[in-house]
Amino acid sequence: MRKHPVYAPIAGFCMIGIGLCLCRYAYTPLIPALIEEGWVTKAGAGYISAFNCIGYLIGCLGGLFLPARVGIRRLLQISLALAVIGQTLSAWNLGFAYFAFARAVTGLAGASLVILTPSLVLEHVPENWKKVASGICFTGAGGAIVLVSLLLPFFSAVSVTAGWLFEAGITLAFAVIAWPLTHSAPTNASQSDSGSLSPRGRRAGISLSLLGVAYFLASIGVTPHMLFLTDYLHRDLHVPMATSSRLFSLVGLGSLIGAFSSGFIARLIGTPLSLVLNYILGSFAVAMVLLTDSITLITISAFLMGFFLFCCVTLSSIRTAEITGIEHHPRDWGILTLGFGSGLAVGSYGLSWILSFGASYYSLFVVAQAVLIVSLVLSLVLVLQTLSDSTQRSS
């Protein structure tokens, strides 16, 4: 197989940008306009996001089990095509059920890209650059968020439909750039079958469980920032709609820097300690919203949350490979991605349910703070277990 050590991370950047941003978080800057133009209600915006999460969960299961039946190449290509189709379908207001279906399609498309892209890219990268390459891949989400947040207001000022078509256009451009990399992926079931993989050890299973639960809770903890922040700024803090949408670009900037720097940080101080410091940062970002209504500090909090989220995604992917090995990475990272998608669904449905009873956005950030503190504790336990394992091996 030909190696593409430069192109592969660029293509990975585009595929992760589609999977994590354009199929998921690029919805957030449009929420104020969707509510203003009557596409959804305040709680309905959260429920639409939850349908996107359901699609993501189904896609996670597909990313785990379909490669052994249809091959990774075909699954990636179908996912890229569905992402473009789902974004385009979202551009018309034909009722709640139709809109929910369109967002479910995009979620379905995004999951397989997130699960299968990292290991495919790493096959083309030298060993000493694998952590950095992982970081570059996941900067795609942050880069796409920055692009969407800064340019979207020009299109959404025309109409919500124009905003969606703008996002569909970016999705198509990213898919075209990434498409050639898919030709290096396995084409048949026998090459993609994970059933013959050796079982992971007991200690590895415990470590993966700790990592997975922390990652699941993190996906709940980021939901207020990643789903409701723009409308919180616009509706509760009276920030103009276009400004609140552009402020979301700081989440993308933080995401970009967090994902890119995570590989270097992991090389410098180790992945387990990097995760602990990152969970501390995430808890601090939520605390800033709880302790102040300063627009300046809340926008800084948005930057920090973006940094936290995609640093967390990248570090969790790297740590998964460290625990179980590159060979097992697609399977085990797929399980963690499924857990992350479950957390997104729980966060979207649960927090929207709370809003439907008249709760304020502020109460959602209280919930986020609690779950991120639990994630921090679990990451500390994972560090202690890693130290214990190192001590046993040295003795």
Image (spheres, helix red, strand yellow):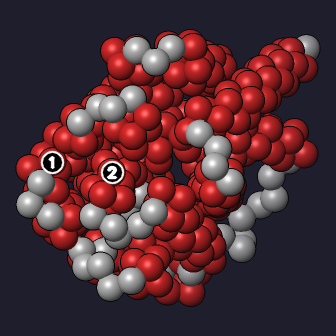
Could you tell me which quadrant the N terminus lies in?
bottom left
Residue density around tag 1, few if under 14, some if 14–19, many if 20 or more, within 10 Å: many
- Which element carries disc 2, helix, strand or loop? helix
Q: Is residue 278 left or right of residue 232?
A: right
Return the residue at label 2: 32
Name which quarter of the figure residue 364 lies in: top right
Q: Is residue 347 left or right of residue 71?
A: right
Label 1 to label 2: alpha-carbon separation: 11 Å
Q: Is residue 232 in view? A: yes
Where residue 205 appears, as percent x and y from the top left, is 83, 46
| Residue type for callout 1 | Pro
**Up-down: is 292 above or below 319?**
above
| Residue under the point 70% across and 35% down | 367
**Up-down: is 176 above or below 317?**
below
Q: Is residue 392 left or right of residue 378?
A: right
- Number of the front mark, 1 or 2: 2
Label located before the other in sequence (1 or 2): 2
Where residue 331 appears, as percent x and y from the top left, is 64, 61
| Residue under the point 18% across and 61% down | 163
Return the residue at label 1: 153
